[in-house]
Amino acid sequence: MKAILFDLDGTLIDSSEGITKSAQYALAHYGIEETDLKKLYFFIGPPLSVTFQTHYGFSEKKAYEAVQVYRERYNKIGIFECSLFPGVETCIRKLKESGYMIGMASSKPEESCKRILDHFGILDLFDDVVGATFDGRIDKKEEVLNEVMRRWSDIPKDEMCLIGDTMFDVEGANQVGIPCYAVSFGFGDVGKMLAAGAVDVCDDMKDLQSIIEKHCS
């Protein structure tokens, strides 16, 4: 294994407050009131446009508009309503010291990912940050991973893996042909992730390197 890709929301950061409050803000714009933020956790992980269409029956056009409303709050306030999970910085520094390339593959807009990583002082630990585009051209995890493959074309797929916390990560990795490792402290269902093909589960970031190397030896 040469390159390790990380999802962001639910994998490196607990972004639940910023995402759910911004989703609440967008829904209120359309007259949909939700006071229990935990009921909006399904906004964490998948592309926002998909969530508005799937859970609220928005048309593609209306979902696109709803995402813009969401970003009115998120880009100003919600983006920093988050925290690093314990052990993240130490884990990534050790992986870098061990010679791994470190990348990000997130369905969050690429610029937002960079702002968050910079906010926590770990942007310089990443060899590249790949995320969604604001115009929707790159949105789903498979599309993000394909962009990683384009930028890192000199690295064979069998030397890459993805670390994520939801089915969207596992399915995206499956679609491009790379292994996915699940973290248990995010927002996804670990059992479903394993059933869908996740290689193993990491319960603590300090154990991530040993778990990966166990399957690559």
Image (spheres, grey):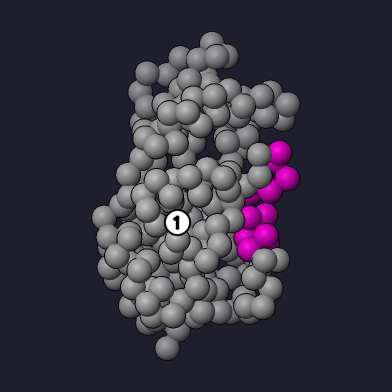
* Residue 115 image offset from top left, x and y in percent: 48, 45
Looking at the image, how many numbered discs can be counted on the residues? 1
Q: Nearer the viewer, residue 174 or 150?
A: 150
Against 137, residue 182 (above or below) is: below
Against 190, residue 29 (above or below) is: above
Residue with the most extreme top position: 31
Against 16, residue 160 (above or below) is: below
* Residue 151 image offset from top left, x and y in percent: 67, 66
Q: Nearer the viewer, residue 207 or 78?
A: 78
Q: Residue at x 62, y 37 (%)?
A: 50
Q: Residue at x 48, y 63 (%)?
A: 126
The disc labelled 1 sits on which kind of residue?
A: Leu
* Residue 30 image offset from top left, x and y in percent: 57, 14
Question: Tag 1, which secondary structure?
Answer: helix
Q: Residue at x 37, y 66 (%)?
A: 92
What is the magenta range?
Answer: 135-148
* Residue 41 image offset from top left, x and y in percent: 42, 36
Q: Residue at x 37, y 53 (%)?
A: 121
Q: Nearer the viewer, residue 118 or 60?
A: 118
146 in the magenta segment: yes
Q: Which residue corresponds to mark 1? A: 123
Residue with the most extreme bottom position: 217
Res 214 → quadrant: bottom left
Disc 1 crowd, CA 10 A, few/some/many (<14, 14-19, 20+): some
Q: Is residue 187 visible?
A: no
Q: Is residue 75 visible?
A: yes
Against 12, residue 200 (above or below) is: below
23 in the magenta segment: no
**Rendered-image quadrant of the C terminus:** bottom left
Give the left or right position of residue 1, taking residue 11 as reference: right
